[in-house]
Amino acid sequence: MYRIRLRKIAIVRYTLILQFLCAAFFAGCEESFNDKPGELEARATLSDIEQTRANPAVNNPLPNIYIQPPKRIDVNDGVKVFYFTREQPAAQMATIITTQMGYKVTANDATNQLIIHCANDAEADTVLEILNLIDLSPIQVNIDCTIVELYADKTFDRETTVDITNIFGEDFTFGGKSPSFPGASLREAKRGTFGMGIGYESNKVKMLVDMLVSRGYLKILMNPTIETVNGQKAKVLSRDFVPIQKTVTQQLNVLPYDITEYQWVEDSLEVLPHVYADGSVGLSTEIKIGSNTKPKGVVQTSVITERSIKVDENRVKPGYSLVIGGIRRTEKRDVLRGYPVLKDIPVVGLLFSSRDFEESGSELIFILTPSISSGGMEYAKMLEMVDKKQAAPKYDAGLDKILTDPSGDKAYTEHIKQKADEATTEKARIETEAKTIRAQADQTKVEAEQAQAEAANAVAQAEKAKAEAALERANAEKLQTESIKAQADAEKAKADAESARAQAEKARSEADADKVATEKIKAQAKQAQAQAEKSQAEAEQAKAQADSAKAQAEKAKAEADNAQAEADKIKAEAATAKANAEQAQAEAERIKAQAEQERLKARRAIEANMPAFDPNAPAPEEPKPAPDANQPKDPNK
C-alpha cells in the first residue's frame, strides 16, 4: 500500500511537471501562432524605423569652381574681381572691404562670392592681398558647463490630542479638539491626513501624542555642452511640461478639491565666447536650471524650483575651469506650542504641547570649462556611437527566457537583426570611405591641374625672364666693349703725353747744357744767355702743358667707363698737348741752333778782335730782350 501511494504521488508529480512544461511551451509559441499579416507588417515597419541610416551625401566633394583662384575681367571703367570666400561669410567680408577701402562690392550669399570693382590691376592686387589677410578660419569654441545642486531637509513634528469628559461631573470637560495642540498641520494641511498617535483612549479619556520625523535630499548634476564660433552667440534649451497638483479651498459652499495644472520647467545655457590673442577665452554667460522633484516640508512635497545666473564676461584660459558663481543657504525653524505652565512640566508637558521643527540646507555651484574645439568627429564614428546607444542591452538567457521562448525564435530574430544592423553600418562605412576616396581623388586631380597651370605659368615667366636677362647681358657686353675701347684710347693718349713729356725733358736738358756753355762766355754773350733762358722758360711751359695733358689723360681714363665723349675730348686735348710739345721742341731746336750760331759768331769775333786783357775795362753792355708780343702796349707811348 505504501509503494502504491508513493507511485501515485510520483505520477501526479510528473503529470504536473508535464502540464507546466506544455503551458510554458505554448505560452512561448503563442506569438508564433498569432502572427497575422498586420502584426508582421508592424514589426517590419518598427524594425526599419529603429535602424540608424547613413547619410549617402555626407562626403560629397565641393564643386571645383569654388576652389578656383580669384579671376579678373576687364571692363570699360576698370577691372572686376571675382573672389570665393574660404572661411568668412561673404556679406561680412563685403562690409569690411567697403568700409576700409571704399570699393564697390557686391556679395552673393548663395555662392559666398564677392564681386569687387577696381580701377586697375594694381588696385585689384591690393584688394586680393587684403582679402588673404582677413579671410581666416574662425576659432571654434567648446563650452562645457557643470552645474551641481545639493539639498537636504529634515523635520520633526509633534502633535498632541487631549480630550477628557465628565471627569468631575457631567459638566466638566478637559480638551475637546483634535488635535489639541497642532504642529506642522497648521502650515501643511496634508500633515493631518496621516500619522500614528500613541497614548490612552477610552470612552471618557483620550490622550494621544502623534510624532513624525522626515528626511529628504536632492542632488542635481547637469552637464550641458555647446560649441560655437568665436564671437557668435549659442543657446541650448531643454523643457519639460510637468503637472502640478493644487487644492482649491476659497470657493463658498464648495468643498476643497484638487486640480492639476501644467507648468514649464526648463534648463538652458546661453554663451557668447571671445577668444583673445593671449589664449584666454572671454565668456558672456546666462544659465538657468529648473527642477520639479525638490522635497519640501514635513510631507516632503515636490516643489518646482528655478536657479539662474547671468555674467557679462569672464576670462578663462583654455583647459581650465572657473567657478563663475554659487549659492550656499541654510534654514532652521522651530515652533513650540502648548498650554501655559503645563507645557513646562517635565514629561507631563509633552501632553500639553506641540513642536514643529525643520532644518534645510542647499548649495548651488556653476562651473565653466572652455576649450578650443577640434572641429567635429568622423561620420562613421558618430554612427557607431549612436548605434551603441540605441542597441538593446545584452543579457544571459535564464530560466524565464527558456520558459517564454523555448524554441529560441526571439533570440534568433535578435541575432539576425543585430547582424543586419552590423551589415548596414559596415555598408555605410564602406560607402563613406569610397566617397571619401573619390572626393580625395577629385581634389587631387584639381590640385594637379592647378599645379600644371602654375607650372606652365612659371615656365612662361622663366622664359620671359631669360629673354630679359639675355637682353641685359647683350647691353652689358656692349657697354663693356665701349668701355674697353675708351680705356684703350685713353691709354694711347697717355702714351702720347708721356712721349711729349720725354721730348720736353730732353729739350730741357739740352737747354741746360747750352746754359752752361753760355755762362762760360757770359761776358761776351749775354744776349745769347737771355735767349737761352727764354728757351728754358718756354721749355718749362711746354713741360707744364705736358703734365696738364697727362693729368687730363688720367682723368679721361677714370671717366672712360661713364662717357665715350669725355674720352674723345681728352684724346683731342692730348693731341693738342702733343702738338704744343712738338712746337716747343721745334722752338727749342731753333733756339739751340741760333745759340750755336751766336756762340760761333761770338767766338770768331773774340778771336778776331780780342784786345789785350784790361781788368779796368767796363763790362760790355747787356743786350735788351726782345719785346713780348703778348704784353699790352702803353697808350701813353
Image (cartoon, rainbow, N blue to C red):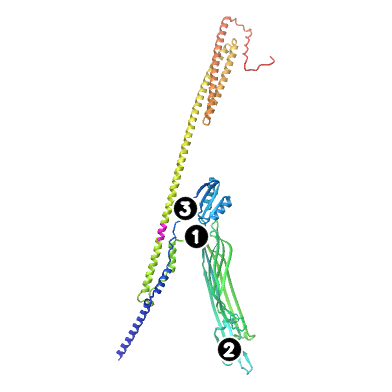
Quadrant in which the N terminus appears: bottom left
Type of the residue with mark 2? Met
Q: Which mark is residue 207?
A: 2
- Disc count in the image? 3
**Residue 436 on the magenta segment:** yes
Residue 123 in percent (x, y) is at 55, 46
Write the start and end of the magenta stretch as one range: 431-437
Is residue 277 visible in the rendered image? The answer is no
Q: Secondary structure at mark 2?
A: strand
Farthest front residue in view: 76
Amino acid type of the residue that numbered disc 3 sits on in the rendered structure:
Ile
User: Which residue lies under the disc numbered 3?
Assistant: 65
Label drawn at residue 373:
1
Query: Is 478 placed above or below 96 here?
Result: above
| SS at circle 1 | loop
Whole-percent x, y for residue 548 in the image: 56, 24
Distance from the alpha carbon under mark 1 to that under mark 3: 29 Å
Where in the figure is residue 334, as x and y percent of width and height? 60, 79
The residues bearing labels 1 and 2 have C-alpha atoms spaced at a distance of: 71 Å
